Amino acid sequence: MTEEELNNIIGGLKDNEDTIYSLTERAKKYKQEKKFSEAECIWKKLSEKVKNEIYYIQQQAFCRYKSGKPTKCKALTDALKIIESISESTDTETLGITGAINKGLWEEVKDESYLNEALKFYKKGWNLHEDYYTGENYAFCCEQKSLLKKGEQKIFYEYNAKMIREEIILILLDSLKEEQPNDVKWKYATLSNCYLAIGKQSEAEDNEKLFLKENPIIWEIETFNKSKKYINEYLKINK
């Protein structure tokens, strides 16, 4: 959902019921401040007040898994149940969040079925929209699969991951040439990690600096560093 579409929804709700508007603004503020449990409670109220509004369900699921409470595993399984109500949706946000929850469960319990589910949702997002977020995570899942496989299957996943990352780089470099490119912060973050994964250290460092110049908030930096850490670990294992 674009910022304009979201503002249109919020604007309409503000005209009809100011409490919904104020709740939405408060939830967004809590999310920005990394107060995910508080934000989740409000998104839940909003999803109950405004039935069938996908955005509120997405945000509730996102904040539920990001809260990590009472445990990471519990937060993730709860989030998976929340997002399942809209799992047939093919928009990038739903596919990305569903992929992220399954990816998180894979990281926690190392059950390959979760990795397979994450790969499925990220692949769908990439194939449908060529969305760089789902693409980057699709590549990550392929890299993780390559570590579990041998022979031709291992080669297939390694090759696939490299091709995806190279495609993402081309798409993002092209998009940054636009007169007023959007999501610049995340584009630099993704470029940095994609360059790192294909062995272009200098380009990775340059784009990391550009990402940090965009003043990302704490959880955004943590998300970037987590991806960077996984790539470095993968490269170390796969020498």
Image: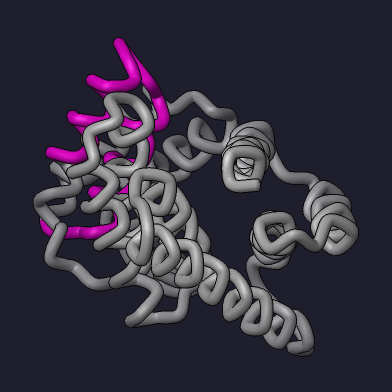
Residue 15, picture quadrant? bottom left
Rendered residue at 23%/20% (across/down): 74
The spot of residue 143 in percent (x, y) is 47, 54
What residue is drawn where x is 9% and y is 51%? 85
Q: Which percent across, then down, holds residue 190?
A: 65, 60
Query: Can you see residue 87?
Result: yes
156 lies left or right of 179: left
Query: Which residue is drawn at the image coordinates 19% and 30% (left, top)?
Result: 77
In the rendered image, the quadrant that contains the N terminus is bottom left
In the rendered structure, which segment of residues is drawn in magenta?
52-81
The vertical placement of 214 against 174, above or below, is: above
Specify whether residue 80 is painted magenta.
Answer: yes
Q: Is residue 148 shown left or right of residue 45?
A: right
Quadrant in the rendering for residue 234? top right
Most frequent secondary structure within the magenta stretch: helix
Of residues 151 and 45, the one drawn nearer to the viewer in this rendering: 151
Which quarter of the picture shows residue 180? bottom right
